[in-house]
Amino acid sequence: MAKLVSVNVGMPKGVPWKGRTVYTGAWKYPVDGPRMLRRLNLDGDGQGDTAGHGGEIRAVLVYQLASYRYWARELHREDLAPGMFGENLTVDGLPDDGVFIGDRYRIGDAVVEVTQPRVTCYRAGMRVGEPRLAALLVAHHRPGFYCRVLTEGEVEAGQDIVKISEGPQRISVAEMDALLYLPGHPRENLERALGIPALSPGWRTSLQNLFEQAAQVGTAAGNSGLTGVAAPPPSWVGFRSMRISGIHTESRDVRSLMLVDTEGAVSPEWVAGQSIALRVPAAAEAAAVVRNYSLCNSPRAGAYRIGVKRESPGTVSTYIHDKISVGDVVEVAAPRGTFRLVDATNPVLLLSAGIGVTPLLSMLHHLVASRSNRPVWWLYAARDGGAHPFADEVRTLLGQLPNTRSHVVYSRPSATDQTGIDYDQVGHLDYDTLASLAPPRDADAYLCGPQLFMDQLGEALRACGLDPANIHHERFGALSAITPGIAAVASDPPHLPAGTPGPGPSVEFARSAIAAPWSADYASLLEFAEACDVPTRWSCRTGVCHTCETAVLAGQVDYDPEPLDPPAEGTVLLCVATPTQPLVLDL
């Protein structure tokens, strides 16, 4: 008979870590006597990061006494005590390889249902004092598991734990954990797992992504269950020389460049919405710098076109506008990116402002080339007609589709701009405009433009009834940081790391316009990026969760430790990687 060994609770608190403060509820301690187990948690308990822990699906975390004994041997520790692995219930007789997702148990007056394995997180390692713990829990098949509370009631150490029903498909906690985090992902097992009603929505989405990835041909290796999308592998590694075959003025501050292979070969096709990285000299005496530009012509064109807006200040855009000529050769990294048009039959909303038109223009070209019958809505915002690039091209393309609707908004039209011809409304694309247009709720929406524009339009689309999962954004600059448990603080713009430059290869953060020599003082590229105040995304910091997976434009890395499941081709896991040669990251 399984037993409840200890009931552990703890409220979130700030814990010093690497010069920062982490707000976490990982510090749990045993309590005496009965404790009420409620729908969201135990009385007296709380979670610091409710995005990854807690809530109705993850109301209570369970860990095994046998695993405590195992880790005491593996880690040579004699101080491990109930609650140190962040669990609410320390139990005996419920091993991770013997408990199935969907199992139901009675503990005292309460009834719980197993919903998912523990989500790996760096904070468990903080409590135990073992930075590798997130990876070790997965690699050793001892994650622990979460439960939802079906019947509230009092629980107390010493009570029996009675199994009252078994989950369908008989997929154990350990097997489910390995199915997501470890290599393999057998499609038949993914299908079985998706047939478990009790499985949490987050894990269901991850496994569905893996299931779909397994059915696709030509996608890069990698784990779409963790990254959210399986992008095609890049067509080539590093940078390739391409010649500028054409330059056109598209508006008063935008010019387009057509790039072709220097040997006359047809350039590889890409997915509409993706971008390339351009490496150009900022000045005759300066080192080359890298910038990302969305492709804005048809993916089947055999050549690459980008639109570049003159920025002030803007070292690279100024160089492109004032110095580059037809016939010049530039270095180009292969098309990449997860912002891409998904083939489907539902309506498409293409919403952009300013130079944000470029990736959506590529999508429009693709819809025309594929003779799509999807309803297409084109919504665009500019200052006036002089700042409206590709206007005639867009009108021509929309005229070649059977079911379109266009709405162009100018904030300050000029005297020569004509209502009903150049634009449809004075003002801004905002909630009121969207609400008056009544976009279809079942649409896929693609947004690109200034950050504030995308934030406001994303919120407006949700208010209009669109599913948030169907609202897609593209950002030209650095992505927003993900630093779980650490409060957002005002940070300096990206800069060179403090101290004496290291002797290692150059590391360039393309989106942040920073390049610096590598120093072995840093344990990983993630730590190096943090030292430069480059916005980063991470969670486990041990090569498990793939939150830090980043595109590599050029260069190679070593891993220590090796990731449990390799990242997609052309990407790197920053948290366990160090450079072995000059490196350019899409960060």
Image (spheres, rainbow, N blue to C red):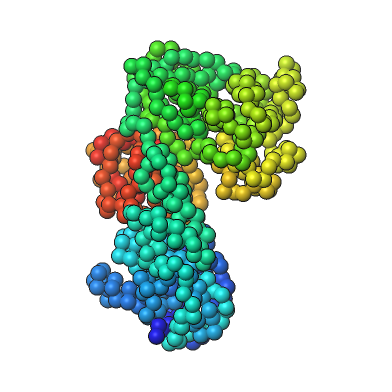
Q: Is residue 522 above or below residue 343?
A: below
Can the viewer see residue 249?
A: yes
Q: Is residue 377 above or below residue 298?
A: below
Can the viewer see residue 445?
A: no
Q: Is residue 365 above or below residue 119?
A: above
Q: Position of residue 529 (x, y in %)?
A: 37, 44
Towards the viewer: 465 or 517: 465
Residue at screen point 40% across, 27% down: 268
Q: Position of residue 202 (x, y in %)?
A: 50, 58
Residue at screen point 37% across, 80% down: 93
Residue at screen point 56% across, 75% down: 150
Towards the viewer: 24 or 569: 569
Number of marks in the image?
0
Say whether residue 337 is left or right of residue 358: left
Q: Position of residue 547 (x, y in %)?
A: 42, 50
Picture quarter with the C terminus: top left
Q: Position of residue 572 (x, y in %)?
A: 34, 44
Residue at screen point 45% across, 83% down: 161
Picture quarter with the N terminus: bottom left
Towards the viewer: 562 or 519: 562
Q: Quadrant of residue 324?
A: top left
